[in-house]
Image (spheres, rainbow, N blue to C red):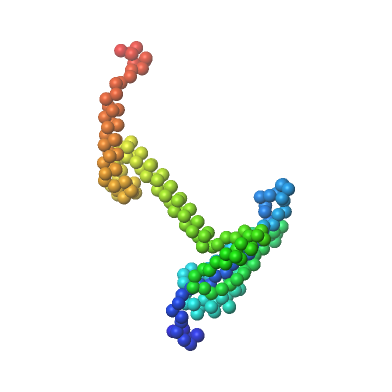
Amino acid sequence: MCPILGHELDKKRGNVFYDIKISYLRSDLSGTLFEGQVDTQIIKGKKLFDHPVSMDICEICARLCQDRIKERVRNHYSTELFFSEYHGRYFSFEIQNVRAERRESRDLMQDLEDIRNGIQIVHASDMEKWDSENKRERRRQSRESAVRRLEKKLLENGYESLEEHSTDRRHADKWLGPERIAELEQMHLLKEKEKKEQPVQLSLFDMEAL
């Protein structure tokens, strides 16, 4: 029950979606034939709320909270707006198509029309997916690098060289498992044995001393 609206909130949940149209000076084209080119991009399907809320709230916010949305976008692009105002690096934004929806909808025909007009179209949900995949890939690469470093340490110094409550010991137990640890330990012992069995090579100085 909402005391302000005087009735029970709609159990259906959604979000407030909006599009951001930005125009910016292509600084990477300075010194080329295309210097001064201004590109336009529309980011579609940005969300006002971090999680779904009642559609009653969404519909009210879609009507009354557009200033809040504009301020949020202004803060996000504060650096670009600063350089535009004080250094002549053109940048502007416009909030479009604020709507309350249960889930993001896409207008393919409008996207195609915008693209034909030279506007770059990006959907916020796609950007979030790409960011998530990139973060997952970076974590995977970081983990693989840490595992290689840890395996090298075990191969060179043995499992027992890791202090009992150290981070390396915990990571070895968690990441490698008993079978891989045993395999590396066996390789380490074999390597140490080979070192001990290698013939000692006397230097010329040693031979003269004998």
Where is residue 71 shown, x and y percent of the image?
60, 69
Q: Quadrant of the N terminus?
A: bottom left
Residue 87 visible to an observer of this rendering: no
In this rendering, the answer to whether 155 lies above or below 18 is: above
Residue 4 at x, y percent in the picture: 50, 85
Q: Residue at x 54, y 70 (%)?
A: 17
Nearer to the camera, 190 or 11: 11
* Residue 178 in sight: yes
Numbered circles on residues, count: 0
User: Residue lying farthest front?
Assistant: 109
Is 149 or 110 nearer to us in this picture?
110
Q: Which residue is outermost to the bottom?
A: 6
The residue nearer to you, when weighing 113 against 157, is 113
Which of these two is toward me, 80 or 201? 80
Quarter of the figure with the C terminus: top left
Against 175, residue 66 (above or below) is below
Q: Quadrant of residue 196?
A: top left
Q: Would you identify the image quadrant in which residue 145 lies? A: top left
Q: Position of residue 24 (x, y in %)?
A: 67, 58
Residue at the (37%, 44%) spot, across then down:
147
**Looking at the picture, how far across and down is residue 122, in whole percent?**
57, 60
Q: Residue at x 70, y 61 (%)?
A: 85
Residue pictured at 60% horizontal, 63% vertical: 111
Above or below: residue 75 compared with residue 199: below
